[in-house]
Image (cartoon, grey):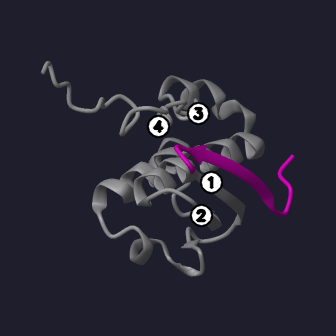
Amino acid sequence: MSKAEISSTGRRKSSVARLRIKKGSGHITVNGKEFIEYFPTLSLQNIILRPLEIANSTSAYDVDVKTNGGGISGQAGAMRLAIARALLQLDDTLRPVLKKEGLLTRDPRMKERKKPGQPGARKRFQFSKR
């Protein structure tokens, strides 16, 4: 039931990752750059590769990602969700395993908005008694 190319979207904070996944040799590109070049830290690389490791397909698919918005950590989280969703489209039997790991849940935490009459979201101007 696998198609030639699957597209998927993931979001985290204000980052969006749109990806296309197809059968290949495990080559990952992010915004035209090599995956390891774009995400230099090992922890971010592990976050992204987690769904592929669980599905035992780290070298089975080529992934091409376009990501924008937010910072590097948010983009890594968005990519992780997009990869997990794409793997689910390819093989529906992975759902219980991916769900147990929490990879199919979109992280709802966002930056809180600044409120009027104060300098930040929660911070107040300095109180003066006299």
Q: Which residue is mark 4?
A: 114
Which amino acid, mark 4?
A: Lys
Of tags 4 and 2, which is closer to the observer?
4
Q: Residue at x 38, y 33 (%)?
A: 118
Kindly report the distance in space between the C-alpha atoms of the residues bearing marks 3 and 4: 23 Å
**CA–CA distance between discs 1 and 3?**
12 Å
Query: Mark 1 or mark 3, which has the lower sequence index?
Result: 1
Q: Earlier in the sequence, mark 3 or mark 4?
A: 3
| Magenta-highlighted residues | 1-14
Residue sitting nearer the eye, 98 or 109: 109
What secondary structure is marked by label 3? loop
Q: Contact, CB < 8 Å: mark 3 with mark 4?
A: no
Q: Is residue 64 above or below residue 115?
A: below
- Residue at 73 percent across and 51 percent down: it is 8
Discs 1/4, front: 4
Q: Nearer the viewer, residue 109 or 63?
A: 109
Q: Are marks 1 and 2 in contact (CB under 8 Å)?
A: yes
Label disc, if present, on residue 68 of the rendered structure: 2
Instruction: Return the residue at label 1.
Output: 16
Q: Could you tell me which secondary element the residue under label 1 belongs to?
A: strand
* Placement of 13 over or under 92, stated as above or below: below
- Crowdedness of circle 4 by 10 Å Cα count: few (<14), some, many (20+)? few
* Mark 1 or mark 4: whose residue is earlier in sequence: 1
Which part of the image, by quadrant, shows the C terminus?
Answer: top left
Find the distance from the CA under tag 1 to the CA under tag 4: 22 Å
User: Amino acid type of disc 3?
Assistant: Arg
Residue 81 position in % (x across, y down): 58, 43
Give the residue displayed 27% in from the left and 32% down from the top.
Answer: 125
Name the outermost residue toward the front: 130
Q: Which mark is residue 106?
A: 3
Sequence-earlier tag: 4 or 2: 2
